[in-house]
Image: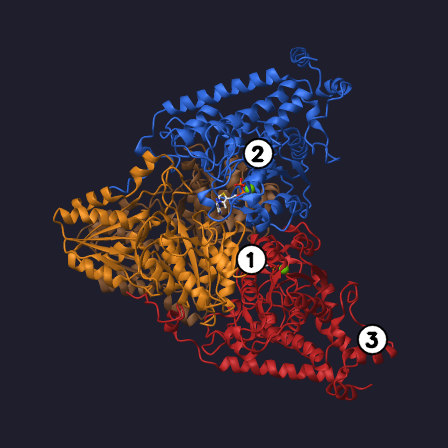
Chain colours: A blue, B brown, C red, D orange
């Protein structure tokens, strides 16, 4: 079965399940899928039933995030005029992609699902549907950026696609996200509120508040905990007595799943189940995705232009570095490779088509960076705007 | 038009807004949104609007405020009533989130929400954590929230209507010491602006500025001074952020004497800002503050009452200036 | 076996276990003990082994708390000169008594165990060893009171007996108490830090912080949760998804017990186990004592002079009242009765001796109130002291 | 005596106190207590004192502060280092517990503890929550804590020694923008008092008052003004609570002109208190404040840098006054 034939099949509406029966005959269906993909026996394998364009769209999203990351790293390492900074998401792309693929990302604001992000937002933003050019201009502090240059990386927000914003603080976002879920339930909407958070969020007092109130009020709320093993420079065992943080959520009576965060389809399956539950009034869900980031906590120390990942020395870590072998071991189970190989296995595309998609994505990213770099800088006085909905505050720095 | 208590007037405003907007919510903890007033129907938000919109939570004021922020971001008007014991628990959420989100997102986030923050009744005997009157200062330095402190039932209702209709987050301070005040309050909705001080009495010898729970004492002292022939101008701040400099400066430019009164601790109470703004803008005037000393409120009524800048203290301070 | 004979036996050092063998022969040993006393099969019945004076001391402590409560209620209801207020503890006496009986309550400050209390502190204070007269003078705002009139009920503290203080806030005390436990472990002391808290503390963010850090650092910390079913006017099911709050603690891997809070000996057994664990470096324990308060949340509304308990109307409750039948049902399992009957069953004293003890206690309480009422009032200017260790602040209320 | 950075000087003070007192503890989160300085041994509290005394916790600043309070109450000296991102998380614990416990217990509680509160480096680009400079105000209104803000490595070490030896809880503000400053700092322990401002330069035409992260800009402006012939008196507040009124008033009584500079937001920044105290005590003087406007710090360097009251702004404001 070649990719062209398959493409046609999809357009004709052959379901994924139908396709899989054919693929299974060829004996390759599950061959290259990730080790843990079927680990959790109770979970439905919903991804199987998705239309081809949706499945290919997931790979494309992963690639878009990945190449945005890599281009940004290269810019930071080679272009001294480039001013943006970043908390890199590379390595975790499958989590944002799988979760957002299960959400309603367009339509009127009072009907779409909302997602709250963290200090590491670019992957979540792109997966939720934020425009890459506008986002990149914002990261580069431009007046025409997504948020007019007020936000930069740590506060980018685009409510029009339900991307409620990055947040530089660890903890509050989770409680705030339950507030949106509370509003949905109060106004009888079937919208769902999702929050992304790291393993570092477990220790915050807000963890308890978010889960307890979500459970008590049966809120349409999904807590996606991306356990990338480290909060800043400390392993999560410094702050959490659980091996699976999901166990902490189960204690509240909240259904929880641990998934392979490197496999976008496994993430999607768990998210789909959670979204279905939330929409139908079944209350909150907790998803712990085991994953890993390829770069250091912040910026590009230890990285090399043109190469993926960062190893060893990070001046901010001071005394504690992640073992290089650990980073390399995780890079063996790369979310790009896993998604790509699975789709090739499933016959949705062949290597050539996958390569072509990647080239398209690279071109798009290059263009976004170029566009952003041409955008105008901010006007100093505009800093006095947007404090309140109307008017400006007084420039008190001036005598 | 009926004589109404502070709380009845406020809940009347809230109930009318909730009737008009089926998405609006209210979160409370130990203070049920219930009020009664002679000759008027009992207001009970929980029974009127149901438990999906009006929620009684556990003791987690930080969650209450954050839930309201999340509801606002999702496009629902929302309000919460924080009891005074918990008034600083959600401080960070208001300081680092509510007050900054609009600006940080370049105007993309909007927060049509109200945080009703109860302030203690300054009841003698309750001591350190239950008689203090300090949160006006903390919530006044934060940019991006409108911090208001109405001191009469009329203002309280009108400012609550304005606050609920405002796209900006409002910290609505409720000095519980005023709970027994009542006055004529219209039955219909009306707005009182969120950026204007009120001149309660005009005069030319001395300007006295007070706010919130301190106003009854200020007015009492002003009456005595007026009766004795002093021409006293009394200003009720009403709004702490953004403070109405114009009204203050115009008054002090006229009287050339400013007495600023805080129930909050002296250091960096609202009166510091009042004096500083006037001192920057009016030359040759005299300035004086009285306030609660920089000490927690002690339990013993003997100690506590002596430390309050009450009508007697205001009177004495004014006499010393004119 | 009459009480005089028994008294002699104790002085001669006959152990409780030894005595119980005799009592068992008489067939009455467990007859009148509370229903749930032996419910938890794993728990050692340590109280059996205690010397007589210690066991009788527990009854005396319960009686001292109870009569302090009743006298205070009567004062509030009948004496218009009386200015004290109270959060009544009546009904819960066995909890404070049983826990503190397992602690080290005297000795140098760097060797005694510490207990942190709540807004409902009088029972904890008396059980920990605070002087009743000084406490009562403090509650009546006297200059010679325990805390010089600065504290009144909600902040009484006497570190000299390890009573670290009442606290008017719900939540922080628990985290603060773990800090003392942290200090003990850091300095190699075998002291133990105990916190009392209500069911209302479960919902606070501090609940998570206290338990998580106590577990992570294996702190000598005991969380005694007095589940009296209500936080102020709301049933605990409004704020907690668990039937047994102890389940929440178990989720952290912290050993937890649910005990009958009306039976002082059962409380003692759980506390003894917890203290032994903490002292030997075994980390934290959580004890949930199911109990009930006989009065309304605060003050004496609904109470009648000379009668125990308060029923129905409480102006502060506004719309939600505890069912009178529920109050009366709990009063059937009174901690005074249970302790008294058990000791009589065990032959430690007879009804006459128990009555005599109660009369002694009543006299002591009456004297404490009388002494307190004669103490001098505070000097106004003293309010400016004790802000810092040295000096006074400036009286800014004066122009 | 060696040239040392701010952090090296401070950790040197801490390490020496911990060596002398085996009960003393240190709690940190993401900032390991490690510092190096050319020609000096590396300081690493964690390896030197072990993980029972020096603890690396999860992201729960509220717990960190409360744990330190509990350690202090139990008789152990204790300190914690709170990163700027979490600087308002433990606000309530300091406001309602640390600051009040001694007074509320009539002197029975003692808190020999230090809260090192990092303030942002005001790095342009980090925006709202990571470039703000506002906590000086919040922690200044609280009674019962000594809130200090040293602006030089020498003062930082000496005030840390005093803070650790003080029986009072100390909020020790660390403006991270000063991390690159270095100067000669004695190797031995010495104390700098916790209640005195520092006159950095004497003069008679104008008093400029600044603090913390704003001092380098104030000094730079003062140098330029001095070079141009103006006689400028420069005061570094150093202590916010209790503020050293005497030094301020003596200076303004002499110069009759006060320029108070805040990096904090204008409304109720420390400069409001500086102006108010001087206005109450000195007649016929002129007063001016400059500060960060009442807006969160925007990300764009163009906007942010324009909003900072930097040396250029201080210079211009001074020129406008004299
Ligand atoms: C309240 C608070 N404290 C500290 C920080 C500093 N900080 C930024 S990111 C981070 C680690 C977060 O770890 P995690 O949640 O696991 O997310 P990850 O960085 O691994 O994606 C910390 C401690 C913060 N942003 N907010
Ligand atoms: C942070 C905070 N919020 C609210 C209050 C008001 N308050 C005082 S006691 C109380 C109920 C406490 O319930 P619980 O912990 O069950 O203790 P109980 O009164 O039943 O002994 C509340 C809400 C408070 N003291 N502190
Ligand atoms: Mg992480
Ligand atoms: Mg309770």
Mark 2 residue's CB less than 8 Å from ligand 1: yes
Disc 3 from disc 1: Cα separation: 41 Å
Rendering coords of residue B246 (x, y %): 27, 44
What's the distance in space between the residues labelled 2 and 1, CA to CA? 36 Å
Does the CB distance between marks 2 and 3 fall below 8 Å?
A: no
User: Toward the viewer: B56 or A370?
Assistant: A370
Instruction: Using residue D285 as the reference point, say whether residue C150 is left or right of it.
Output: right
**Pick the front one: A231 or C311:** A231
Q: Residue shown at 50%/76% (left/top)?
A: C146
Q: Nearer the viewer, mark 2 or mark 3?
A: 2
Q: Position of residue C280 (x, y in %)?
A: 65, 67
Q: Quadrant of the N terminus of chain B?
A: top left
Label 2: which residue? Answer: A92
- SS of the residue under disc 1: loop
Provide the residue designation for mark 3: C29
Disc 1 under 8 Å from ligand 2? The reply is: yes
> For ligand 4, which image quadrant applies?
bottom right
Circle 2: element type: loop
Query: 10 Å neighbourhood of mark 1: few (<14), some, or many (≥20)?
Result: many
Q: Are marks 3 and 1 in contact (CB under 8 Å)?
A: no
Dot 2, how many residues are within 10 Å of its Cα: few (below 14), some (14-19), or many (20+)?
many
Q: Does the rendering let one see residue A257?
A: yes
Q: Earlier in the sequence, mark 3 or mark 1?
A: 3
Q: Which residue is mark 1?
A: C171
Horizontal side, residue B124 vs residue C295: left or right: left
Give the secondary structure at mark 3.
loop
């Amino acid at each position: 079965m070649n990719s062209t034939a398959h493409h046609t099949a999809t357009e004709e509406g052959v379901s994924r399940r139908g396709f899989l029966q054919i693929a299974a005959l060829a004996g390759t269906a599950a061959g290259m899928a990730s080790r843990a993909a079927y680990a959790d026996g109770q979970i439905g394998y919903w991804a199987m039933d998705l239309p081809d364009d949706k499945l290919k769209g997931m790979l494309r999203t992963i690639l878009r995030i990945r190449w945005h990351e890599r281009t940004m790293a290269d810019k930071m390492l080679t272009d001294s005029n480039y001013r943006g900074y970043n908390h890199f998401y590379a390595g975790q792309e499958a989590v944002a992609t799988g979760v957002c693929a299960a959400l309603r990302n367009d339509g009127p604001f009072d009907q779409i699902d909302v997602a709250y992000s963290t200090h590491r937002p670019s992957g979540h933003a792109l997966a939720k549907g934020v425009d890459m050019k506008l986002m990149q201009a914002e990261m580069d502090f431009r007046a025409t950026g997504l948020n007019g240059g007020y936000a930069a990386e740590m506060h980018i927000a685009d409510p029009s696609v339900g991307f409620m914003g990055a947040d530089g603080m660890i903890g509050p976002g989770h409680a705030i996200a339950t507030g949106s879920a509370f509003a949905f339930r109060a106004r009888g909407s079937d919208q769902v509120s999702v929050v992304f958070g790291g393993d570092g969020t477990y220790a915050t007092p807000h963890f308890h508040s978010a889960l307890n109130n979500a459970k008590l009020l049966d809120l349409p709320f999904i807590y996606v905990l991306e356990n990338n093993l480290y909060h800043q420079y400390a392993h999560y065992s410094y702050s959490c007595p659980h091996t699976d943080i999901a166990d902490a959520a189960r204690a509240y009576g909240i259904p929880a799943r641990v998934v392979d965060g490197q496999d976008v389809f496994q993430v999607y399956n768990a998210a789909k189940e959670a979204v279905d539950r939330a929409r139908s009034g079944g209350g909150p869900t907790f998803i712990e995705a085991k994953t890993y980031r390829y770069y250091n906590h912040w910026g590009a120390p230890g990285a090399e232009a043109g190469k993926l990942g960062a190893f060893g020395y990070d001046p901010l870590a001071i005394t504690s570095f992640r073992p290089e072998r650990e980073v390399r071991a995780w890079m063996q189970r790369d979310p790009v490779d896993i998604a790509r190989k699975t789709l090739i296995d499933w016959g949705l595309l062949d290597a050539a088509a996958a390569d072509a998609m990647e080239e398209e994505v690279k071109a798009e990213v290059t263009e976004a960076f170029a566009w952003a770099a041409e955008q105008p800088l901010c006007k100093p006085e505009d800093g006095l705007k947007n404090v309140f909905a109307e008017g400006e505050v007084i420039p008190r720095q001036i005598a | 038009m009926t004589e109404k208590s502070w709380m009845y007037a406020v809940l009347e405003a809230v109930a009318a807004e909730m009737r008009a907007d089926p998405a609006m919510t209210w979160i409370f903890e130990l203070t049920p949104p219930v009020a009664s007033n002679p000759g008027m129907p009992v207001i009970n938000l929980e029974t009127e609007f149901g438990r999906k919109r009006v929620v009684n939570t556990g003791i987690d004021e930080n969650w209450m405020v954050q839930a309201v922020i999340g509801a606002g971001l999702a496009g629902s008007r929302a309000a919460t009533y924080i009891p005074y014991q918990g008034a600083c628990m959600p401080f960070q959420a208001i300081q680092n989130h509510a007050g900054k989100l609009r600006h940080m997102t370049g105007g993309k986030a909007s927060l049509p929400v109200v945080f009703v923050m109860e302030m203690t009744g300054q009841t003698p005997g309750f001591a350190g954590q239950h008689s203090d009157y300090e949160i006006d200062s903390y919530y006044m330095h934060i940019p991006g929230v409108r911090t208001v402190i109405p001191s009469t039932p009329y203002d309280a209702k009108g400012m609550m209507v304005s606050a609920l209709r405002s796209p900006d987050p409002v910290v609505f301070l409720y000095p519980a010491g005023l709970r027994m005040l009542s006055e004529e309050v219209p039955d219909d909705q009306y707005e009182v602006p969120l950026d204007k001080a009120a001149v309660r009495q005009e005069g030319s010898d001395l300007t006295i500025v007070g706010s919130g729970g301190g106003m009854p004492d200020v007015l009492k002292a002003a009456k005595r001074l007026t009766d004795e022939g002093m021409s006293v101008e009394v200003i009720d701040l009403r709004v702490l952020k953004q403070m109405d400099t114009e009204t203050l400066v115009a008054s002090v430019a006229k009287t050339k004497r400013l007495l600023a009164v805080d129930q909050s601790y002296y250091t960096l109470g609202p009166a510091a800002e009042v004096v500083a703004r006037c001192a920057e803008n009016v030359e040759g005037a005299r300035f004086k503050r009285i306030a609660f000393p920089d000490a927690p409120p002690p339990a013993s009524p003997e100690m506590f009452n002596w430390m309050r800048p009450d009508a007697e203290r205001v009177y004495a301070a004014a006499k010393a200036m004119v």
